[in-house]
Image: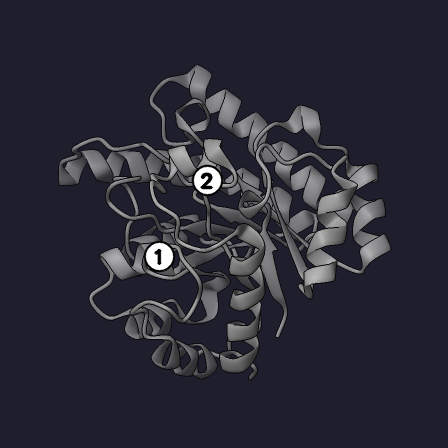
Amino acid sequence: MPFGINTFLFSSPFSTREASLFEKVARLGFQVFEMAIEDPELIDAAEGRAQLEKYGLKPVVCTVVGPERNLAADDDAVYQVANQYLNFCIDFAAQVGAKVICGPFHSAVAYTELLSDSERSRVLERVSKRLRPLAAKAADNGVLLAFETLNRFENCLINTTEQALELVKMVDSPALGIHLDTFHMNIEEKDMPAAIRLAGPVLYHFHTCENDRGILGTGHIPWKDIAVALREVNYHGDFVIESFTDQVRSIARAVSTWRKVAPSSEVLAEKGLQFLKSNFVF
């Protein structure tokens, strides 16, 4: 199986000029390089593709969407910024050969409004309308869009697989599917393997993260049951570690990592990869 790492573990904001980061990821033994795109001004497709090819890494594009890039926003100016950013991500993915764009781009991290059922329905309709042309563009470029379910403290719109499927059905495009992350699932899903089975063929991307964002296998995530469920739905996508340590202070602050969850980012990556190779070889 293809195992990967998200750049947030080592760097923020990521730049395609960071040749040493590409080298580090390859040296650690990862096959997949998931690039968190915070600032498009730091991203150059030619640079990125050259480094990916040099180190034999498979690219994934991870969207970074705060309130200023909220696709669900009622404010048209905010929507336009989000739409421009997501179009950039699709273009970049196509140029570097990435087949998946992941992250919570359906709305935004920190989008936490108390929505009534009718208000939520209106927001979902607005989001689905805005996602359709993006999904069409992604399909034209051979790219899959995998939007992430987030926990209730980070997002109010889509927290579970069941809610995510609502949006998938509304958009009705084979280019749009679901991105699940075990950290968020651990908070929101009553049965994590059942949620994976529910996603089934529209599960396009998978983040592995321990319940405390520490080293995989050291917490209480039911990894064996998750592996069984992923085999049952015939998941053949990537397995990417997305965790954070205090080495990248801006991200640690943003995701409330107040204590040391691993000796270092490198140890978290190395031990995590060992765990994935022992438990997720299908």
Residue 233 is situated, as x and y percent measured from the top left of the image, at 44, 78
Spatial CA span between label 1 and label 2: 18 Å
Q: Is residue 178 left or right of residue 84?
A: left
Q: Quadrant of residue 274 in the image?
A: bottom right
Q: Secondary structure at mark 2?
A: loop
Residue 186 x %, y %: 28, 61
**Residue at the limit of the structure toward the front, as seen here:** 263
**At 71% across and 32% down in the image, what residue appears?**
43
Residue 69 lies left or right of residue 48; in this view the side is left
Numbered tag placed on residue 105 in the rendering? 2
User: Is 41 placed left or right of 37 in the picture?
Assistant: right
| Quarter where residue 270 is shown | bottom right
Identify the residue at image location x=13%, y=36%: 116
Residue ranking furthest to the left = 116
Decide which of 147, 11 is in the foreground and name it: 11
Badge 2 local density, few (<14 within 10 Å), some, or many (20+)? many
Mark 1, other Cα within 10 Å: few <14 / some 14–19 / many ≥20? many
- Residue type at numbered disc 2: Phe
| Residue 145 appears anywhere in the view | no
Residue drawn 41% across the image and 41% down it: 106
Residue bearing mark 1: 183
Query: Do callouts 1 and 2 mark residues in contact (Cβ within 8 Å)?
Result: no
Residue 262 placed where, x, y %?
A: 44, 55
| Spot occupied by residue 154 in the image (x, y as percentages of width and height) | 30, 39
The correct choice, above or below, for 150 with respect to 231 in the image is above
Q: Between 169 and 49, which is closer to the camera in this rendering?
A: 49
Q: Is residue 8 visible?
A: yes
What type is the residue that disc 1 sits on?
Answer: Phe
Q: Residue at x 36, y 74 (%)?
A: 197
